[in-house]
Amino acid sequence: CAINSISAYSSSFVDIYDEKGNFPKEDMLNLWLFLNSSIGYLIRELNGRKNLGGGLLKAEATDLKDVPLYFNFDKVQDIKNIYEKLKNRQALPTIDEIDTEEHRRIDEIVFYFLGISKRRGEMIINYLKTKIFERIKKSKT
């Protein structure tokens, strides 16, 4: 998930537009945080469309419409710090991104907010990695 600060339209992503220009930056960062968490990734793996060939994954708005995506994590400064570290960095392949320090910090905030224990969080991350590997392997067979 990326914050599109130049208001460019994309042709292949799920976009959320703030047409009135009044969506608070803190709310945008909360949404960004959740969508970049392992749980956000896992929701896409489970609900996204995988029939695109080559192991590609796409989540359409209709695939996500019944999934709660917004939470007020009440960690504005922490989220801003993570966002500032990531906003100019090249995105890594998903499986590599999961193991970055920034992603671990994102998961820490989301898991804590949702009451997910460290052990259960590790299980979620391992399941996510399994789903990604299965999708990639399937695309090659």
Image: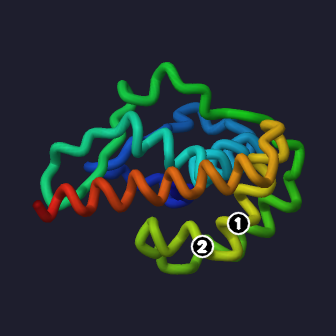
User: In the rendered structure, which amino acid carries the disc numbered 1?
Assistant: Arg
Query: Could you tell me which residue is drawn at 51 percent across and 51 percent down?
Result: 127
The relative height of residue 141 versus residue 114 in the rendered view (above or below) is below
Quadrant in which the C terminus is drawn: bottom left
Residue 26 located left or right of residue 95: right
Q: Give the camera-side residue of 20 and 121.
A: 121
Please, what secondary structure does the residue beneath circle 1 have? Answer: helix
The image position of residue 68, as x and y in percent, is 61, 26
Give the numbered dot on residue 104: 1
Tell me where residue 125 sits by quadrant.
bottom right
User: In the rendered structure, which amino acid carries the disc numbered 2?
Assistant: Asp
Residue 54 located left or right of residue 38: left
Residue 56 located left or right of residue 61: left
Query: Could you tell me which residue is drawn at 61 percent across and 71 percent down?
Result: 87
The image position of residue 17, as x and y in percent, is 49, 38
Q: Which residue is mark 2?
A: 99
Q: Give the camera-side residue of 29 and 37.
A: 37
Tell me where residue 133 sits by quadrant.
bottom left
Residue 124 located left or right of residue 8: right
Check contact, mark 1 vs mark 2: CB within 8 A.
Answer: yes
The image position of residue 109, as x and y in percent, is 80, 52
The relative height of residue 60 versus residue 104 in the rendered view (above or below) is above
Query: Could you tell me which residue is drawn at 68 percent across and 37 percent down?
Result: 23
Inter-mark Cα distance, 1 to 2: 7 Å
Q: Give the camera-side residue of 137 and 97.
A: 137
Q: Give the camera-side residue of 7 and 135.
A: 135
Q: Earlier in the sequence, mark 1 or mark 2?
A: 2
Please, what secondary structure does the residue beneath circle 2 have? Answer: loop
The relative height of residue 67 versus residue 10 in the rendered view (above or below) is above
